[in-house]
Amino acid sequence: MKNKMIFLSIFLCLSLCFSSSKLFASDKIRIVTTTSTIADLVRQIAGDHADIYYIASPKRDIHFIAPTPKDVLKVKKAQVFVHSGLDLEAWRGPLLDAVGRTDLMWPSGDKQIDVSKGISLLEVPTSLSRSQGDQHAYGNPHYAMDPVNVKIMGNNIAEGLSNIFPHQSANFKKNADDLNQKIDEKLKGWTKRMSPYQGMEVVTYHRNWSYFTKRFGFMIIGEVEPKPGIPPTAKHMASLINSMKEKNVRIIMTESFRESRAPAKIAEATGAKVLTLAQDVGETQEGKDYISMMEQNIHLLEDALAQRKEVK
Amino acid sequence: MRLLSSVFLIFLICLFCSTQVSADQIPGDAIQKELSFLRQSVLGLQDTVHDLNSTVKNQNEVIEKQAVRIDVLERIKEGAVPQVGATTLTPVGTPKLAGVSGFNPDIGLVASIQGNLTQNKADKEGNNAVALKELELNLAHVVDPFSRLDAVISFNDNLEDQNVNIEEGYYTRWGLPLGFTGQVGKFRSKIGKQNVLHLDQLETVDYPIVIRDFFGEEGLASSGARLQNMIPNPWDIPAEITAEILRGNNGTSFSGVSRRPIFNVHAKTYFDLTDDANLELGWTTLFGDENPPINGIRPPEGQDCYGVKVFGGDMTFNWFLPEGKKVKFQNEIYFQNRTNLVHVNDDPWGFYSLLDYRFSQKFSAGVRFDFLQPLDVVGEHRQTIGISPYLTFWQSEFADFQLQYSRLEPANGSDKVDNALFLKANVLIGAHKHPVQ
């Protein structure tokens, strides 16, 4: 009798727990995104109708995120999962395996939104080999650094949300249009400000900046990493220093989560300036949303390039 | 053009009808007929528009594929994309062009090569040698929209036990009632933190002493079934619960009899302490049997069924520092409670503490402290104490080299202190999955 009572109590407790998520559910759409940049776009498109949570801290390298039990719980309860598609988030598969919801799995789940649809990818490899470092099989996935691609991402989010919540589609579409308009206006200004420096050569730490440099007309002559994902070696750094001196390259673009010793060493040898730019919303204090993040990046770059011009 | 003509035609028809209605006062049934005809026409036109849209969509896809191909060809021509052993011009990762090879399972191979140098002369020949400790073949893929299959097969080249071992091979079924995930097959049991990991995933070259003594040289992996879920709660506190029933032929603390299963329940929770620090707490309870096989199913007199109980707690603290640096502090403690007729010590216990510091992209260093009051101690309780500092060089994400020194004071007083040096290389090729821990 005592055992029966214990089992009954456990059963009741578990039932209460499993039903509690419905009892305490809010009216907002529960959306989980992989990055803070996607979370910002979702916020602008879904407005106040969404309760948004993102997994990857913008202060850590997106390639090496280890999802936590909290992330598993959040995704398990999510109504929509929005992600970068491709293979930027190598941890996404194991996360979704742990969650166990096929409706959120890429590419066929009907409650997941892949924001990369329709984006023209750069650096698509023709063959795969780890001798080329940590290659991305589908092409360079850091496409969000081009504001034009962000418009496509926004449209994908609006379309995806409209498919899942058709009664709010007009609202999503309007917000996406507003976002596109804001980006268009800003892009005009950014392009104008960067236009005097078109064709200028820069060095980046990782291939995070291919889309950005293409949009604003810079030339990347090399990376601090010898191959993507491979830590810098002395031999490679020496060769990079020589190239930079030869071409008088004065800008090294990096991110806040990278080690700073190698870029500092190269900067010391070449007289170049190390620019720590933001990759994701929230990576720096100034970049609270996508537009302010890009504004800050452009501002830092403009300052550094103007100084370089004066030196020249 | 065709669409425009159709719209114009509808417009003319509408205009014609409206003028007719107003001019000639057509009777009701005729109006109905006209409306029905118009409805049919509109539906027909909608179908036409739909077909045209599909055609345009298909054409766009063809153009997209051609654009990708042209882009690749142009970049190859410009020398922007080096062709390393390329046999095809097709962008390899483009999902639409992946072809049937996309159905092949993910394949990965991990080699762990280890060199040992030990002071203990009682060690046999194999201990002072370089050996392919393990070659681990990983195969995994989604089975259907509801499940996946994972297999880990290891090959050992130790001098004394060169063999093939099914480390894991389990089927996962998602979406069971109440959101449970079920697994059947052979898997590493969900005991604390380190038992779940494969050898190449450990920070150190070997498993902690308490894991080795309680659950076997490479921890406990056994055939059985597992149910796992996150318990939803209104406070959004992660609370994961796992229940397992395992075949009893593995795990040094238990009987070794297949018919005597081991039951395991693991619960864990997690807290974000700050934006950069988190804490995970777990609890493990195992019930098994110690009965020696000579008595068959019946336990010896005076000994309870499932007389071996193992209780364990684990605590992991992660602290993320700027520039990709990280500190990890992990502890696991285990106690046994046995109705003991076979071993001398009926309440063995042990723990380990591991401190790992990833101080650069290339290097991490740490130390593990082990303590154990083992099962098979003759006479008074004695202790095994170990300390193992280590340094790891990360050549890349796919190759790392570990140097570890271990000092072990064994429990048995007659054995001398053992100083050992290990050098281990972990190298992986192909796909490799790191499950969420």
Image (cartoon, coloured by chain):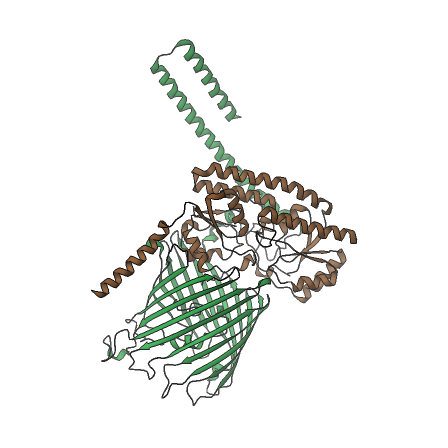
The residue sitting at 44% across, 28% down in the picture is B46
Residue B222 pos. (x, y %): 36, 69
Q: Is residue B435 visible?
A: no
Chain whose colour in the figure is green: B
Residue A101 pos. (x, y %): 40, 52
The residue sitting at 43% across, 42% down in the picture is A164
Residue B200 pos. (x, y %): 49, 69
Q: Quadrant of the N terminus of chain A?
A: bottom left
Name, please, the residue furthest toward the bottom. Answer: B414
- Which of the two residues, B242 or B431, is positioned nearer the viewer here? B242
Q: How many marks?
A: 0
Q: Is residue B186 left or right of residue B306?
A: right
Name, please, the residue furthest toward the left. Answer: A1
Q: Is residue B396 left or right of residue B159?
A: right
The residue sitting at 38% across, 76% down in the picture is B214
- Which of the two residues, A166 or B23, is positioned nearer the viewer here? A166
Q: Is residue B288 left or right of residue A229?
A: left
Position of residue B246 relative to residue A284, above or below, is below
- Which of the two residues, B85 or A26, is positioned nearer the viewer here? A26
Q: Quadrant of residue B32?
A: top left
Name, please, the residue furthest toward the top. Answer: B24
Residue A239 pos. (x, y %): 71, 62
Chain whose colour in the figure is brown: A
Position of residue B194 relative to residue A15, above or below, is below
Q: Is residue B82 visible?
A: yes
Q: Is residue A8 left or right of residue B165?
A: left
